[in-house]
Image: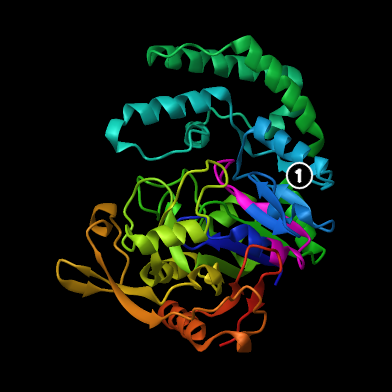
């Protein structure tokens, strides 16, 4: 299987980094294909936590070449802080490659993000204010600045100055103080000089690696239902985290991909506003948040939580052509006397099993649950399928029945090795 794609099957925060870290053992290149520094991936190794925002999760393995591909928008201060932090912990980033075609984030993007969110008043989307959306908007407007432009620093400085002056005019029109153009140019030229050794034609790099028989892992940020086209719009991100986005975001073709792994928690969470059919606003919801430590890696924001939604997962299987599911955080359900799985929705009194294509309709549905007995057993030491309690096996069987693809990996703890390979 030359190319594997890992994609979140819910609203993000599914534990993708843990599965990417697991799969990285057998891959030579680990490629981040979209998003920016608004999403954090956390890996725990021997009790040490590594929180990654831009550098691909595979960087923790010496044999992996980490690649930030063309579909990513790159915040250089964050990237270099992350590199410095990793190398300070003796994790080398020397082999990191950054695509010439990746777009850069600048202070005016963050300013526009804050202005736009403030203007929404009570209808805020819940953006992280990292400048991700405005950077992608500039890419679509064809006024963005690409990472490859740093190879000519004089020209890069001129481009940054011209863009900063143009954006300052818009910022001042919005009633906000202008940015310091000279300071931005000086700072980003310094960043550009530091970026030069990492710059690469990553499309050619990856295709040449395929020709040599290398194994490539494509890593998405965010998740299926934050996809710009297929998510709960407008409460979405500004790129395409779905498996289709992996091709556009990396330069690899659809026929190169042979395995697509969808990551889901054993329950559901989301951050910020937007419809959430299985959300729990009771003691069970509080337990999921507290036991699951459901707070954002990047923002620290408290997540909303609810039971597992298999209607969502069926849609994720369709949209991504998932070949399998990796289910994380099964251990978070250890203490429940009973657990629920949503298998359908009720809309205006009618039972439906498809995922509505409009957010306002999704906000009106009522979940239809199957209730199972809890296992009331600590799963953290389980490593073999046969050691799972019957109740936990029944839970996994319902997931496989409802979504139509196998669950191949089950996470039972935060550490790197806290998982089991599941076979029904």
Query: In which quarter of the view is residue 256 placed?
Result: bottom right
Q: Quick check: 203 above or below 282?
A: above
Vertical side of 149 occupied by 360: above or below: below
- For the C terminus, the image quarter is bottom right
How many marks can you see? 1
Q: Could you tell me which residue is drawn at 84 percent across and 56 percent down?
A: 62
Residue 217 falls left or right of residue 181:
right
Mark 1 neighbour class, 10 Å CA radius: few under 14, some 14 to 19, many 20 or more: many
**Residue 278 percent location from the top left of the image:** 33, 63
Q: Does 30 appear in magenta?
A: yes
Q: Nearer the viewer, residue 366 or 164?
A: 366
Q: Is residue 201 above or below residue 183?
A: below
Find disc 1 in the rendering and name its residue: 97
Q: Which quadrant does the N terminus fall into?
A: bottom right
In this picture, which residue range is highlighted in magenta?
Answer: 21-41
Colour scheme used in the picture?
A: rainbow
Q: Position of residue 390 (x, y in %)?
A: 51, 88
Dot 1: element? strand
| 123 sits left or right of 55 in the view | left
Q: Position of residue 310 (x, y in %)?
A: 39, 72
């Amino acid at each position: 299987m030359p190319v594997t794609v890992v994609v979140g099957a819910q609203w993000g925060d599914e534990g993708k980094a843990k599965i990417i870290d697991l799969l990285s053992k057998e891959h030579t290149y680990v490629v981040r294909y979209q998003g920016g520094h608004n999403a954090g991936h956390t890996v725990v190794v021997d009790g040490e936590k590594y929180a990654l925002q831009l550098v691909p999760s595979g960087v923790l393995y010496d044999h992996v070449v980490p690649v930030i591909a063309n579909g990513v928008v790159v915040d250089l201060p964050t990237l270099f802080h992350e590199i410095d932090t990793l190398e300070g912990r003796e994790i080398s980033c020397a082999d990191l490659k950054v695509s010439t075609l990746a777009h850069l984030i600048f202070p005016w993007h963050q300013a526009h993000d804050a202005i736009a969110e403030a203007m929404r008043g009570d209808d805020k989307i819940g953006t992280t204010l990292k400048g991700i959306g405005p950077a992608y908007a500039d890419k679509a407007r064809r006024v963005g600045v690409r990472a490859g432009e740093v190879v000519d620093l004089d020209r890069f400085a001129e481009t940054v100055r011209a863009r900063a002056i143009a954006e300052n005019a818009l910022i001042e029109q919005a009633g906000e103080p202008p940015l310091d153009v000279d300071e931005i140019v000086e700072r980003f030229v310094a960043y550009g000089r530091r970026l030069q050794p990492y710059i690469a034609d990553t499309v050619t790099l990856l295709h040449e690696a395929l020709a040599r028989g290398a194994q490539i892992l494509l890593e998405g940020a965010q998740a299926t239902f934050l996809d710009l086209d297929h998510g709960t719009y407008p409460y979405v991100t500004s790129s395409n985290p779905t498996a289709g986005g992996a091709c556009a975001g990396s330069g690899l073709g659809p026929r190169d991909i042979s395995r697509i792994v969808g990551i889901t928690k054993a329950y559901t969470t989301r951050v910020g506003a937007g419809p959430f059919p299985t959300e729990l606003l009771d003691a069970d919801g509080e337990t999921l948040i507290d036991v699951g430590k459901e707070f954002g890696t990047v923002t620290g924001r408290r997540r909303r939580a609810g039971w597992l939604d298999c209607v969502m997962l069926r849609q994720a299987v369709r949209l991504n052509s998932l070949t399998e599911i990796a289910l994380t955080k099964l251990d978070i359900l250890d203490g429940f006397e009973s657990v629920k799985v949503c298998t359908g929705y009720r809309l205006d009194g009618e039972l439906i099993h498809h995922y509505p294509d409009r957010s306002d309709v999704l906000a009106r549905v009522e979940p239809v649950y199957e209730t199972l007995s809890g296992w009331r057993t600590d799963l953290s030491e389980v490593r073999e399928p046969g050691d799972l309690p019957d109740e936990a096996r029944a839970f996994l069987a319902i997931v496989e029945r409802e979504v139509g693809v196998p669950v191949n990996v089950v996470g039972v703890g935060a550490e790197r090795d806290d998982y089991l390979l599941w076979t029904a």
